[in-house]
Amino acid sequence: MGKYIVKRLFGLIPTLFVIVTVSFFVIRLAPGSPFATEKAIPVEVRLDLEKKYGFDKPKWEQYLNYMGNLVRGDLGLSTKYPQRTVNEIIFLGLPATMQLGVVALLWSLFIGVGAGMIGAIRQNKIWDHAAMAGAMIGISVPAFVLGPLLMLFFSLYLFWFPPGGWGSWRHLILPGVTLGTVYAAYISRLTRGGLLEVIHADFIRTAKAKGLGERVVLLRHALKGGLLPVVTFLGPAIAALMTGSVVVEKIFSTPGIGPYFVDAAFNRDYFLVMGIVIVDSVFLLLMNLLVDLTYAYLDPRVRYG
């Protein structure tokens, strides 16, 4: 297993190299300039800015310089926030985004797995229909609708949680629930489908024939196999949760990196866009590796070497 992990980790390097290369040239092919504004700036100033950021050089030379800096861990200087580096922006915003992502992940797993188990155990009964109806509502209601509704009820009516801002665990609850609800809906449906396939398998019937109780059979034998579809979904889901949500962070004024990505795209802040793309890609690749390893734990038939 150790050799497999090391091999996969080294295999991430060429994948990340391709992602960075493609992203670099795609961004550069977009029309416009980071220094294009509604108010025209003097030519001399624009030329000085292009020289400062290296945009006066051929694209292949810009690429080589960027890759050299990236190897040293330098993501460049933001053109939108000229006094701040991309490393600084990501370093300051990523912790808040990750805290929000952890709360959303815990909420989605707690509600999603629980609802899916209820739906599978009570198949085609009222509890099953209620759980799946709730899942459909969670999938259908967008975050920009759910967030203000939660804010209105729990902040302005009940005064349980602050409507926005940052500072304590109470600021995490409403945005975490808003962000995690749609994932909980998908997880509930995947859990239900996975469990329905497993609970009719021969080894489950054997466990029941041995006299094991329903709860023991479900938790000890069926749940591992039933969660395999959820594990597959969680790879990209965790990466998305941990790298920011523009809508949720905007609604609740969370100081994460999500809004920076949109602002950087609109302002053609090449280095900031690249920095966030790299962070997102690293999370996605690592989460996919974690999914593969989790498969080996949940399904004894899977072996890596």
Image (cartoon, rainbow, N blue to C red):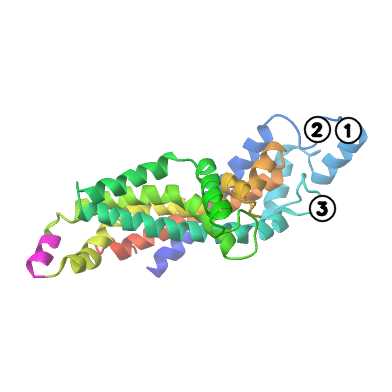
Residue drawn at 20 percent across, 50 percent down? 123
Is most of the magenta stretch helix, strand or loop? Answer: helix
Task: Work out whether residue 148 or residue 79 is closer to the camera in this orientation and state it.
Answer: 148
Q: What residue is disc 1 on?
A: 41
* Residue sitting farthest toward the left: 209
Check residue 114 for magenta coloring. Answer: no
Query: Which mark is drawn over residue 204?
Result: none
On screen, residue 205 versus residue 56, left or right, reads: left
Quarter of the image where one finds residue 302: bottom left
Magenta range is 203-211
Quadrant position of the N terminus in the picture: bottom left
Residue at position x 62%, y 58% in the image: 94
Please state which amino acid type lies under the numbered disc 2.
Thr
Name the spot of residue 161 as percent of width and height, x first.
56, 59
The residue at which mark 3 appears reads as 83
Residue at point 83% right, 40% down?
A: 50
**Mark 1–mark 2 contact, CB under 8 Å?**
yes
Q: Secondary structure at mark 1?
A: loop
Marker count (numbered): 3
Residue 139 appears in view:
yes
Name the residue beneath numbered marker 2.
37
Q: Could you give the CA–CA distance between mark 1 and mark 2, rounded to whole angstroms?
A: 8 Å
Q: Is residue 255 left or right of residue 101?
A: right
Disc 2 from disc 3: Cα separation: 19 Å
